[in-house]
Image: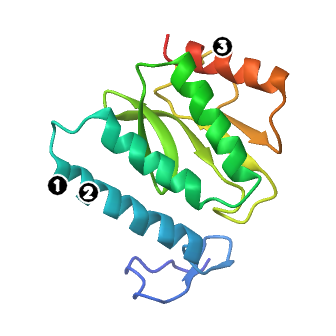
Amino acid sequence: MAEISKKAPKKGSKDVTVTGEVSEGFTDDERAAMRERARELRAAARRGPGAGKEDGESDVLAKIAEMPEPDRAMAERLHAIIKASAPALSPKTWYGMPAYARDGKVVCFFQSAQKFKTRYATLGFSDMANLDEGAMWPTSFALKELTAADEAKIAALVKKAVS
């Protein structure tokens, strides 16, 4: 069996996995999301602990405005649903995505399909969401459009997540 090197790969080098597959590391989109997160953390530090919901809300609305259709319309609708269903959650950006947090910790987020060039947008919930149901439960949902029934389900999920 070949010995696996314990040296850290050089910057920009390819990494070989245990199965022998070549991994290029993070994609350009993933690296951009990480840079976005670093900017968000620096901005939050500059604002200080006294920053209010308004700062986060303006950041979220700006991110939503940058999205192409139909993701923008879905994100706008989700923003309204989440605010109405869980007013205690604070809007903020998280890896460049609209997110909603309690006590600074993300509970749920919206990822546009365009963000990582996927065929559907995603509504996701973190481990801070109270969605536990038995030994297995969903934590993210694919969205291609929002119907009235979907909106009602999302409102119920968000309410449960913060209960």
Numbered mark located on residue 10 in the image: none
Q: Is residue 15 above or below residue 91?
A: below
Relative image position of residue 140 (x, y in whole percent): 68, 36
Q: Cβ–Cβ below 8 Å for labels 3 and 2?
A: no
Q: Residue at x 17, y 55 (%)?
A: 46
Classify residue 71 as left or right of residue 49.
right
What element does badge 1 sit on?
A: helix
* Residue at left offset 26%, top offset 35%: 52
Secondary structure of the residue carrying numbered label 3: loop
Q: Residue at x 62, y 26 (%)?
A: 81
CA distance separating discs 3 and 2: 36 Å
Report whether residue 134 is seen: yes
Per the image, the residue denoted by label 2 is 43
The location of residue 135, given as percent across then percent down, is: 66, 18
Tell whether 88 sits left or right of 113.
left
Q: Residues within 10 Å of mark 3 (few under 14, many from 20)?
A: few
Q: What residue is pinned by disc 1? A: 46
| Nearest the eye: 123 or 16 | 123
The answer to whether residue 135 is visible is no
Amino acid, disc 2: Ala
In the rendered image, residue 83, in percent from the top left (x then y), is placed at 52, 25
* Mark before the other along the chain sequence, 1 or 3: 1
**Residue drawn 56% across and 17% down?**
85
Query: Who is closer to the viewer here, 140 or 77?
Result: 77
Residue 32 screen position, x and y as percent: 49, 71
Q: Which residue is mark 3?
A: 133
